[in-house]
């Protein structure tokens, strides 16, 4: 979390937010990268997730649009951790910080299960890839007819994309890539509101193999194929295998993922030929995030190495894997 936000986030804000949603809360956050995430409990001991978002990250209207979408897909049988209302019946409660900025509180169901263990073949297997595809396919099927909103940005408005476009060295490469992507047709059956970050750290899986997706903070209008590219990107990102081995795994992963996906939604085959463009774009935005979030002493040797690996791929116009 940015230092300016950390300075004004006080315990009082957390406790007041928890009270408004009728829960008690663990004061140690589960996460604090772009939002503060806390585990809380109802009077009956049922776990919930309390999220606090600073106004520098999202506007209230943007958060409400996200939560309304999550509520909609949850009520239509998508496997997601649903959004919940406060004791006042609001999806979002605002808390003013000492500097006049705001923290917006929201609450979600606590997903059943746990994070998948990539090193466990009993979890990281074809059954998971099929279920993963089915989960994203269901979300895409539901977003096709979801009412349009002006309160979630389009890909071209994304702050990370526009940030890297201004990069002295790499901006030109981003510009060329975005020109290619923006040349793709926008139709309701291939472009709409998508999760955009449903990698293996953003869902839990239970003992029966059911996935529950969460963290829709990056919900925005984009091509559906981007959601699929993200699955492949982060599966490769954490692998220590060679590029050839990672690419071979990704092709197999996509084959099984697609079978699950197509039980819920059909995407025209031409889109699968465009996956590489979205793999490349994720490199551009990840590079920007890493250089923005980690500066000076916070930039570890590993972050420096990652940035250089990504930079080399960008200037050579290569994706993290070959599909």
Image (cartoon, rainbow, N blue to C red):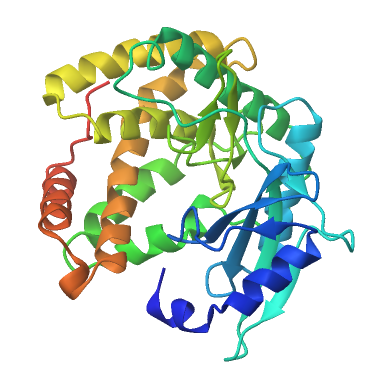
Q: Residue at x 16, y 17 (%)?
A: 245
Give the x, y percent position of residue 306. 16, 49
The N terminus sits in image quarter: bottom left
Res 51 → quadrant? bottom right
The C terminus sits in image quarter: top left
* Residue at the outermost front position: 44
Q: Nearer the viewer, residue 202 or 251?
A: 202
Q: Residue at x 37, y 28 (%)?
A: 275
Give the x, y percent position of residue 249. 26, 15
| Vertical relation: 19 (above or below) 154 | below
Left/right placement of residue 71 relative to residue 13 reads right
Give the x, y percent position of residue 75. 81, 33
* Residue at the outermost right position: 88
Q: How many marks?
A: 0
Res 209 → quadrant? top right
Q: Residue at x 59, y 15 (%)?
A: 266
Res 88 → quadrant? bottom right
Camera sees residue 148: no
Left/right placement of residue 144 relative to residue 260 reads right
Give the x, y percent position of residue 35. 52, 61
Q: Nearer the viewer, residue 201 or 143?
A: 201
Q: Residue at x 76, y 68 (%)?
A: 93
| Vertical relation: 242 (above or below) 86 | above
Camera sees residue 48: yes
Q: Nearer the viewer, residue 277 or 105?
A: 105
Q: Nearer the viewer, residue 5 or 179?
A: 5
């Amino acid at each position: 979390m940015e230092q300016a936000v950390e300075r004004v986030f006080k315990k009082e804000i957390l406790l007041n937010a928890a009270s408004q949603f009728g829960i008690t809360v663990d004061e140690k956050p589960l996460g604090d990268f772009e939002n503060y995430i806390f585990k809380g409990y109802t009077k009956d001991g049922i776990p919930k997730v309390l999220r606090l978002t600073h106004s520098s990250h999202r506007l209230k209207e943007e958060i409400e649009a996200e939560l309304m979408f999550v509520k909609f897909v949850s009520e239509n049988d998508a496997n997601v951790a649903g959004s919940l209302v406060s004791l006042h019946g609001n999806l979002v409660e605002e808390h003013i910080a000492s500097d006049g900025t705001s923290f917006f509180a929201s609450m979600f169901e606590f997903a059943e299960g746990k994070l998948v263990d990539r090193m466990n073949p009993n979890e990281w297997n074809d059954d998971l890839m099929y279920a993963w595809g089915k989960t994203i396919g269901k979300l895409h099927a539901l977003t096709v007819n979801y009412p349009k909103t002006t309160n979630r940005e389009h890909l071209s408005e994304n702050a990370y994309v526009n940030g890297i476009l201004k990069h002295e060295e790499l901006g030109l490469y981003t510009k060329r890539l975005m020109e290619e992507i923006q040349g793709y047709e926008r139709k309701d059956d291939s472009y709409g509101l998508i999760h955009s970050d449903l990698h293996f750290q953003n869902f839990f899986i239970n003992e029966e193999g059911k996935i529950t997706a969460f963290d829709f903070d990056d919900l925005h209008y984009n091509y559906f194929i981007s959601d699929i590219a993200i699955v492949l990107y982060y599966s490769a990102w954490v692998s220590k295998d060679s590029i050839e081995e990672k690419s071979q795994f990704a092709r197999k992963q996509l084959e099984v993922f697609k079978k699950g996906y197509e039980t819920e939604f059909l995407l025209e085959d031409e889109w699968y030929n465009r996956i590489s463009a979205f793999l490349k774009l994720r490199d551009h935005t990840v590079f920007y995030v890493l250089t923005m979030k980690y500066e000076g002493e916070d930039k570890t040797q590993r972050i420096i190495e990652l940035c250089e690996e990504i930079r080399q791929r960008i200037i050579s116009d290569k994706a993290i894997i070959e599909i």
